[in-house]
Image: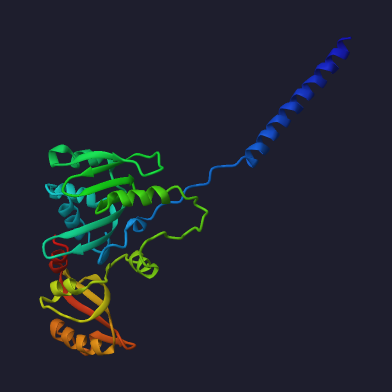
Amino acid sequence: MKKHNLRSRIKLGMIICHIGMTIALLSLLFAACKTVPAGLRPVDAIELIDNNSSFYMAVPKAADNVLIEHIITNMAEGLSEQDAKAIAAHIDKIYCGLNRSKKSMEFQASVEGQIPRSFLPKVLNAKNGWISNTYIPAGSEVNYKIYSGPIEMTFPTDKICCIGRDINGMLDKYDYLSKLPAEEEPGKLYSDLDEELVGYLKGAESDIRFFANKPQSFLTILTGAQLDLKLIDVKGSFTTDEKHPNQYFLDLDFRFKNGTFLKAGRTLLVLAFGLTNSQEEIIGDSELIIKKIRIDKKQLYKLLSL
């Protein structure tokens, strides 16, 4: 009888073990078959810049960290040089769009980096003239804090800061893009800007890149002369001259409305910049490339009213 009980217990133990293994296996199978929420795609800072500016820039830290400090100081009046340096140290690149008039400059920027959230209350506080409120995009459940002072800014994540014009619109777009599944068209950028322009600005690493679809005021500041060049647009880059750290080498790419305007414009540019033949190249009927123009860095800071 005892022998029979022992066999029964062994058999029962084996059945229980088998049931346990079956349950565990089924759990694994159900877990594998269960619908797992798709990973959300990261938002690229450049996607938040709209197409309502006449001048665009990409300023990477590696190209000119001092310029980034100037931009930060200009955006937040009353910010000390020490605090501006502390914030700039956490910034990798600034994408910005500008609209400049004789009386004012309209500014929109999307900043990528590692933004120190713990540092924000020390800088963006009532003592320094800042107030905060929350914004919820239509159809969203996420609250975003907006800081209002000399300019508006918000930090949708610790890797992106949005500044300036149409903060609500930038947050609307961030909220929408941040909820797209990661596997949906991986690598695609949902930018309002032309695809070629996005690629050009994204490629800025050791140089400052810009694009102007209304370049007249830009050229006036650079040359000190009123140049009517009949341009479609102009793009270019600033690279620090290693032998003269206070100067840039400026490369420019002009697109004229036609060949006649190119010839006239080339003559004016030669006089304005004091060019030599080795510095210029004509492509097709209406494109002129000029390279290695030396300019003082303060001229760029003046362009941005910094």
Residue 283, by quadrant, is bottom left
Where is 253 relative to 188, above or below? below
Relative to 180, 222 lies left or right? left
Residue ranking furthest to the front: 138
Residue at point 37% right, 52% down? Answer: 173
Front-lying residue, 112 or 130: 130
Q: Picture coordinates of residue 38 (x, y %)? A: 53, 46
Where is 254 relative to 106, above or below? below
Residue 219, by quadrant, is bottom left
Q: Picture coordinates of residue 20 (x, y %)? A: 71, 27
Where is 271 relative to 86, above or below? below
Locate the C terminus by quadrant: bottom left
Locate the N terminus by quadrant: top right
Relative to 253, 243 lies left or right? left
Residue ranking furthest to the top: 1
Residue 242, by quadrant, is bottom left
Relative to 186, 101 lies left or right? left
